[in-house]
Amino acid sequence: MTAVLQITDTHIVAQGKLVSKLLDTSNSLTQLVTRINSIRNQIGPIDAVLISGDVSDDGSAQSYERFKNLVAPLDLPIYVIPGNHDCRENMRRAFSEHMPVEGPLNWDLRVGEVVIIGLDTLVEGEGLGTLLPRSIGFLEQALARADGSPVLLALHHPPFTSAIEFMDKIGLTNSADISDIISGYGGNLRLVCGHVHSMMISDVAGRVAISAPSPCSAFAFDQRPDAPIGFMNHEDGCLLHRWNNGFQSIRIPPVAGSGPFAF
Ligand SMILES: [Fe+2]
C-alpha cells in the first residue's frame, strides 16, 4: 500500500497579505494541515505529499519559505510542481532537493510502489499552460523508466476541459500530446491536476484524470457562457490517492462535521 496526499492551489503569499484582498490562504492551509494531522490514525500512513501547482500566489521567495513552514507539521516529504501563479526560478531554489538544476521543473521519483511524475506546464506571465517539447520528451522517458509501475502523473493544468469558460480559456494548450503518450503506457496510470479549484473526474486516453479541490477557494461549476468570472471563498480540502493493487482517490473535506451518530 502506498498513499500520496495531494494538496493543490494553496496560493500562499508573504505574511500580512491577503489574496485578492479577501483570502487568508495561509490560515486555510494551516487549518487543513491541522485537520489532516488530527485524522492521521484514521487515514493511515501517508508516504508523501504532492502539491500540484499554484503553491504561491505571487511567486515570491518569501511565499515559498512561508509555505514550507506551514506544511512542516505534516513531517512528510513534500514534492511540488509549478502552476501559472508560480515563479520557476524561486520554486527551483526553494525545493532544490527534488528539482532539476536547469530547464522546466519536470521530475520523476518512486514513492513506495508508485512512480510520481511531475510536469511543468508554466508559461510565465500567462494563465494558460503548455508542455514544451522538452517536457513532452521528459514524459516519454519517465514512463519508460517507470516500466509498468503504477504512475501518478501530475500537472497543474488539467488535460481536459472543465466547461467553466473563463478557466478553459486559460487551460492546457496541448492536451492531445499527453493523450498520445499515455495511451501507450502498459501500467496503471492516474492523472492528477489542480488549476480549476474544484474536484472533477474525467477520462483522458482511457485513464482517470482528476482535478483536486483547493483548500483556499473554489470556482463554481457554471457552464453558462455568461457565467460571472471570479472565485468563491469556499475551502474544499484535498485528496488522498491510495495504491492497493489499483488506485483509489479519496477527498478529505476541510471540516469533519459532528458525529458519528448511531444509526
Ligand atoms: Fe490556482
Image: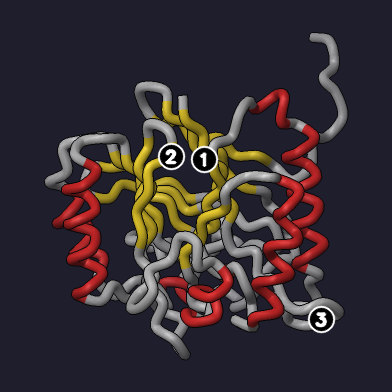
Kind of residue at badge 2: Val
Q: Amino acid under label 3?
A: Lys
Q: Residue at x 40, y 55 (%)?
A: 154
Residues at circles 2 and 1 in contact by the CB criterion of under 8 Å = yes
Within-10-Å neighbours for mark 3: few <14, some 14–19, many 20+? some
Judged by depth in the image, the label closer to the viewer, 2 or 3, is 2
| SS class, disc 1 | strand
Residue 226 shows in this picture: no
Residue toward you, 243 or 18 = 243
Q: Label 1: few (<14), some or many (≥20) within 10 Å?
A: many
**CA distance for labels 2 and 3:** 35 Å
Q: Is residue 7 above or below residue 156?
A: above
Q: Between label 1 and label 3, give the one nearer the viewer.
A: 1
Give the mark nearest the N terminus, 2 or 3: 3
- Residue 158 against residue 231 in the figure, above or below: above
The residue where tag 2 is placed is 111
* Label 3 CB-ligand 1 distance < 8 A: no
